[in-house]
Structure formats: structure tokens, C-alpha cells
Image: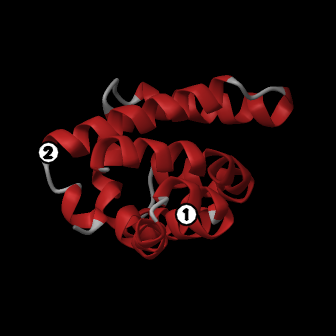
């Protein structure tokens, strides 16, 4: 069964969104220096919108992001190692995830979220690349 089909279950989608939000929280809190301060400030603004905003945003983006990375995931499933394969393809996976996010932000138009994302976009790719193995593990944990 394809990744995009497996995330249609509301409980699965909620669990993935919750775990990914925790991963983002951990990544942001671990940042240091001036760029870390800027990222923490921007993330604070986004989290200030509401305590459930980040998990909700992840849930809304999840179908598009999973559709984008599905080819990598299915290649890994065929090899019997979706987590390892996606981890080995982390740069490609990050580009696909960010592409889905870029498209979603562009459709959203202007606003605080779009503005904040666009200011940080160039600097976050390395963070997404770094997170791909953990994202893969989260997906595997919830969709097998």
C-alpha cells in the first residue's frame, strides 16, 4: 500500500504530525548563534499563533509532502529498507519536501506565515536534510 494511502487514516496523520512537530521543536531549540536566534524568534512567532498551529500545518502539508517523497519511499520499500533508503537519499528527499512546502506557501499568498517562511527558506534546507532520517523513522513507525 502506498505511503499516501496509509496517511489517509486520521489517527495515523495525527500521530505523524505530532511526532514531526516534536522533531521541529527539538531541532529549533538546539540551534545556536545569530542564525539560531533568528530561527527561534521566527518559530516563536509561528507557535504564538496557537499551540496546535504547527501540528495542524504539518497535517495539512502531509498529503503533498508524502506524495512528493513517495517515489523514494517506494524505492526503499522495494529494497526492504525504506528508512535507510530515504536516509541515504536525504538531499533529494529534502528538496521534494521543501518543494511541496514552497507550493503550499505560494498558494497561501501573503501573510505572517508566508513572510516568515520566505525569509528563512534559503537557510532551512540543511535543517530539513538533517531531519530526513528522523522523518523517515517517524513515517516507518506509523505506516510501516
Distance from the alpha carbon under mark 2 to that under mark 1: 23 Å
**Label 1 crowd (10 A; few <14 / some 14-19 / many >=20):** some
Which one is nearer the viewer's eye here, 96 or 49? 96
Q: Is residue 21 left or right of residue 39?
A: left
Which one is nearer the viewer's eye here, 105 or 136? 136
Point out residue 73 in the picture as x, y percentages from the top left corner.
Answer: 44, 66
- Front disc: 2 or 1: 2
Residue at image point 84% right, 31% down = 34
The quarter holding residue 49 reads top left
Q: Quadrant of the N terminus?
A: bottom left
Could you say whether the residue bearing mark 1 is in a helix, strand or loop? helix
Which one is nearer the viewer's eye here, 12 or 56? 12
- Specify which label sits upstream in the sequence, 2 or 1: 2
Residue at image point 44% right, 38% down = 20
The quarter holding residue 16 reads top left
Q: Which numbered marker is on residue 143?
A: none
Residue at image point 39% right, 48% down = 140
Q: Which numbered marker is on residue 10?
A: 2
Report the residue marked by disc 1. Answer: 98
Amino acid at each position: 500500500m502506498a505511503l499516501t494511502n496509509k496517511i489517509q487514516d486520521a489517527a495515523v496523520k495525527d500521530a505523524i504530525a505530532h511526532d514531526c512537530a516534536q522533531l521541529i521543536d527539538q531541532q529549533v531549540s538546539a540551534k545556536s548563534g545569530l542564525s539560531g536566534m533568528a530561527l527561534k524568534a521566527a518559530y516563536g512567532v509561528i507557535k504564538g499563533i496557537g499551540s496546535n498551529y504547527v501540528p495542524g500545518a504539518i497535517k495539512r502539508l502531509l498529503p503533498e509532502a508524502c506524495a512528493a517523497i513517495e517515489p523514494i519511499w517506494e524505492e526503499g520499500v522495494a529494497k526492504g529498507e525504506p528508512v535507510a533508503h530515504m536516509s541515504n537519499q536525504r538531499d533529494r528527499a529534502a528538496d521534494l519536501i521543501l518543494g511541496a512546502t514552497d507550493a503550499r506557501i505560494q498558494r497561501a499568498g501573503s501573510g505572517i506565515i508566508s513572510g516568515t517562511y520566505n525569509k528563512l527558506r534559503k537557510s532551512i534546507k540543511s535543517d530539513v536534510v538533517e531531519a530526513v532520517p528522523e522523518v523517515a523513522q517517524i513515517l516507518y513507525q506509523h505506516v510501516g
